[in-house]
Amino acid sequence: MRVALVTHDSSLRHETGRFHPERPDRIPATIAGVRESGLTVVEYEPSPARFEDLALVHNAGYIADVEDFCSSGGGAFDPDTRVVPESWEAALLSAGGGSAAVEALATGIADVGFVAMRPPGHHALEDQAMGFCLFNNIAITARRLTAQGDKVAIVDWDVHHGNGTQRTFYRDPSVLYVSLHEFPAYPGTGWVDETGSGDAVGTTVNFPMPRATEGAPYRWAMRWVIVPILEEFEPNWLLVSAGYDAHRADPLADILLEESDYAVMAATLAKVVPAQRTVFFLEGGYDLAALTASTAATLQGSAGEAPDPPPVEATGTSGAWKVIRHVATSRV
């Protein structure tokens, strides 16, 4: 199996400040995981996102503000989200990474895509940078695909809810957004009653998991709830916000996944869409060793090399099982 590794050294020049968790070292750690997966790696360099690509998701005034802020020397959009002049190029290339991966798969160069770029994207709103994110990379890619008539599903297993992605597609029935995340936690969105609006009711699905949730509920939800939802939606592209900050070693959250959980989740998702139609996007993940191991496990799982998990019944009384049962029964 071949993986299109989409990356660019501009990601290393996006400096966020000493001791900031979203740091350049995350990229070499992720690339190491791609290579340690054992898959054949095809390196694929992105082109910068064009204004019209960014404008599929973001306001024109906001795009100009980001460019001006970076070119004037940078600084902090908020206490978490910081940039330097080089961040503009990094943001454009990160926003273009998904399109490069799609091209690599659509032309048969690779079988699965992994976008190892930063800054990440799933918190970015149409007019606001937040949560380390400037442009919503995965949403831009999804909008490009739907513009050509495709149906897109986004699965987000980052430990933080992808509020920007949800907001982008909350009224858009051509994109299904599914998120598993810690709750309560930053950014405070993603409760079970957030399900979309208008013609898109039911195309937003949230699993707000309580702190200290381990892998079994995630695996069960993916197999018995999320996959049927995806199959009913019938997407022909699957985009995954692959954050690894739900790993038990991560310093920024309190979910207790292990790399084997990412392998099982990726394997479970592997046949939801046709071959050569799945792209993983790096989002969070701030323990470098866990980032490497989880990236490798994800790609191994996507290739069908996942551990066989023990059978689990959704009969637990913890908050995680209650959330899963609520989501499952509310869709019957």
Image (cartoon, rainbow, N blue to C red):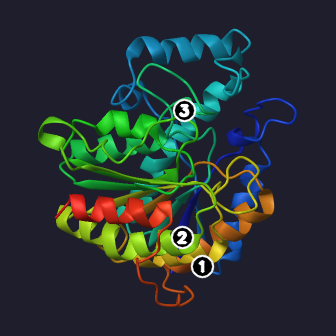
236 relative to 286 in the view: left or right? left
Q: Is residue 299 visible?
A: no
Residue designated by label 3: 92
Report crowding for label 3: few under 14, some 14 to 19, many 20 or more residues within 10 A (C-alpha). Answer: many
Task: Tell me the kind of residue under disc 2.
Answer: Val
| Horizontal and vertical percent position of residue 117 | 62, 47
Residue 39: numbered disc: 1
Measure the alpha-carbon separation of dots 3 and 1: 28 Å
Q: Is residue 284 above or below residue 298?
A: above
x 42%, y 48%: residue: 99
Q: Is residue 59 visible?
A: yes
Measure the alpha-carbon separation of dots 1 and 2: 6 Å
Quarter of the image for residue 239 reads bottom left
Mark 1 or mark 3, which is nearer the start of the sequence?
A: 1
Mark 2 or mark 3, which is nearer the start of the sequence?
A: 2
In this orientation, which residue lies closer to the viewer: 102 or 293? Answer: 293
In this orientation, which residue lies closer to the viewer: 252 or 173? Answer: 252
Measure the alpha-carbon separation of dots 3 and 2: 22 Å
Task: Tell me the kind of residue under disc 3.
Answer: Leu
Task: Tell me the kind of residue under disc 1.
Answer: Leu
Q: Residue furthest front?
A: 317
Q: Is residue 66 above or below residue 123?
A: above
